[in-house]
Amino acid sequence: MENRKLYRIVIDVQYGDMLDECDKLYDGKGSGTVFTDANGEAVIDYLKQWDSDEWTDDDIRSEEPRWVNNGTDSVHQKDEYTLIYNSTIGGVYMLYREANDAEIEWYNNN
């Protein structure tokens, strides 16, 4: 069996109240944030609460998620998480991390 890295998409935020909250945090306007032009760590802290033991087929990838061809603006990392921010599609955020052992086993058996 090939030993390659797998990645788990934790959450992909494209609209609604969550997008509004991410925008506030990213701009340094959310509760408890320090103002910067790109406060990715605050968004990571907010979004990682959706990291759970539940996932779908589309959440585990053999290729690291990226939006390079669509104009990724910023990539932020904190702990084991990576946040991608892309403003060209109306402002979207994707949080992902390297897959854990349970996710890897599930991926290899499906």
Image (cartoon, rainbow, N blue to C red):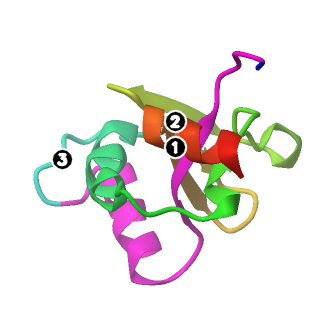
Which is more N-terminal, label 1 or label 3? 3
How far apart are labels 3 and 1 at the CA level? 32 Å
Cβ–Cβ under 8 Å for marks 1 and 2: yes
Q: Do we see residue 27 in this rendering?
A: no
**Residue sitting at 27 percent across and 57 percent down?**
49
Label disc, if present, on residue 33 of the rendered structure: 3
Of the pair 96 and 20, the residue shown nearer to us: 96
**Residue 18 colored magenta?**
yes
Of the pair 5 and 45, the residue shown nearer to us: 5
Given the image, on which type of amino acid does mark 3 rest? Thr
Left or right: 102 in relation to 89: left
Give coordinates of residue 3: x percent, y percent. 70, 15
**Residue 22 colored magenta?**
yes
Name above or below for residue 104 compared with residue 90: above
Give coordinates of residue 92: x percent, y percent. 60, 61
Q: Give the label, 3 or 1, closer to the camera.
A: 1
Q: Do we see residue 26 in this rendering?
A: yes
Given the image, on which type of amino acid does mark 1 rest? Glu
Label disc, if present, on residue 103 of the rendered structure: 1
Of the pair 105 and 62, the residue shown nearer to us: 105
Label disc, if present, on residue 99 of the rendered structure: 2
How far apart are labels 2 and 3 at the CA level? 28 Å
Given the image, on which type of amino acid does mark 2 rest? Ala
**Residue sitting at 74 percent across and 35 percent down?**
62
The magenta span reads: 2-30
Label 1 residue SS: helix
Q: Quadrant of the N terminus?
A: top right
Q: Give the label, 1 or 2, closer to the camera.
A: 1
Q: Residues within 10 Å of mark 3 (few under 14, many from 20)?
A: some
Name above or below for residue 67 compared with residue 30: above
Label 2 residue SS: loop
